Amino acid sequence: MSMFRNALALAAGLAVLAGPALGAYKTEYKLSVVPGASSGWGQSAAYFAEQVKARTEGRVNIKVYYGAQLMAGKQTSELLLVRSGAIDFALASTINWSPQVRELNLTALPFFVANNPDRYKAMDAIEAGKSGAMIVKTIESKGVKFIGWGENGFRELTTSKGPINRPEDMKGMKLRVCGTPIFQDIFTALGSNPQAINWSEAVTGFQQGIVDGQENPTNGINIPLKVWTWHKYSTDWHYMIDPLFFSANRKIWNGFSEKDKAIIEDCARDAEKYSKALSRVGLDDGSALKYLRSIGKVPAVTDPYAEQTKNGMIVTRFTPEQIRVFYEATQSVRDKWTKNIGPKLVKAAQADMEAAK
Ligand code: X2X
């Protein structure tokens, strides 16, 4: 018994000695991303990790885990794992967290952002505006720390059949989507046949031809994936955008010194610029390429249309009139999902985009 008491006393003493260790740093922090290292998303995560390591002089050592490996492929479990502490950091997609955070469906409302004169300006206006602040607050209310934005990009449709010019052209097409409910509604409304498949299994699905197509951003995913291996057509309809964001487990975040928190937030601001530039290069007014040049990180592909065409793809670039037709064809989806997301947030986003015109 006394040995037991001694052991207790010893443990208590050690605990007192170890007091400051409450905020002791791990030797490695795990950061989760869903696609592979060559994706824009993967490169953005690597850039962030490098910057954090260098600027904290090695105190915060983040290792990036690609390919949804920390979630055994199940991309929609990421939030739960960041919340529980099984994952320390994530560069997450709004799409993968939206099953648990309904507000994150905002930028997945079909043609909601694309139906603006400058779609990138509209996206930036949401993030910088009142609606962006509302989204950040909601993410943080789920018990995780929001650190900063990134970007996967506007999602374009690639198919083995085509070209697609009108909603009728999609009739009956089997299209891979991720397991997030709004996608079922959008693709059903357009007359196609959506198939929910995790990204970790999607590429095998393309190889085996079990679907006729998929949708993902051109620079971020489709080009690094060499999507032309299976899909000859790209329909550039910009129907929704996939913003990414850096987040951390709340306890892990609270364990960092104020100085390191500020450094990590600074690194996220730079990673946002890099991530957006990778997503937008060759698709915007030239600002993305200028930025990439200024930091000495120009990627191999700076003209995505030329790259796709060189590889035998036929790219249909939608006119504003075509976008309008698809916008109207998906009105019922926006109506239903505006209710789910919350009309107040949707209105705030509309006002933010309007003010930026
Ligand atoms: O699953 C996808 O399509 C991907 C990789 O873009 C996401 O994680 C949303």
Image (cartoon, helix red, strand yellow):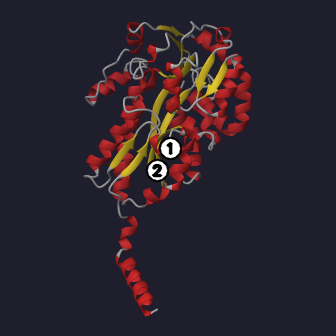
Q: CA distance from mark 1 to mark 2?
A: 9 Å
Res. 144 visible in picture: no
Label 1–label 2 contact, CB within 8 A: yes
The x and y percentages for residue 301 are 34, 18
The amino acid type, in three-letter code, at marker 1 is: Met
Residue underneath mark 2: 87
Residue located farthest toward the front when viewing the structure as drawn: 208
Is disc 2 placed on a helix, strand or loop? Answer: loop
- The C terminus, quarter of image: top right
Label 2 CA crowd tier, 10 Å (few <14, some 14–19, many 20+): many
Name the residue nearer the viewer: 50 or 121. Answer: 50
Q: Is residue 237 above or below residue 312?
A: below
Disc on res. 85: none
Quarter location, residue 94: top right
The x and y percentages for residue 48 are 35, 41
Q: Quick one: label 1 or label 2, which is nearer the N terminus?
A: 1
Direction from residue 238 to residue 36 in the image, left or right: left
Direction from residue 294 to residue 67 in the image, left or right: right
Label 1 CA crowd tier, 10 Å (few <14, some 14–19, many 20+): some
The x and y percentages for residue 134 are 59, 44
Q: Which residue: 64% across, 12% down? A: 170
Q: Which residue: 52% across, 20% down? A: 206
Q: Is residue 72 above or below residue 240?
A: below
Quarter location, residue 282: top left
Direction from residue 52 to residue 92 in the image, left or right: right
Name the residue nearer the viewer: 198 or 293. Answer: 198
The amino acid type, in three-letter code, at marker 2 is: Ile
Disc on res. 71: 1
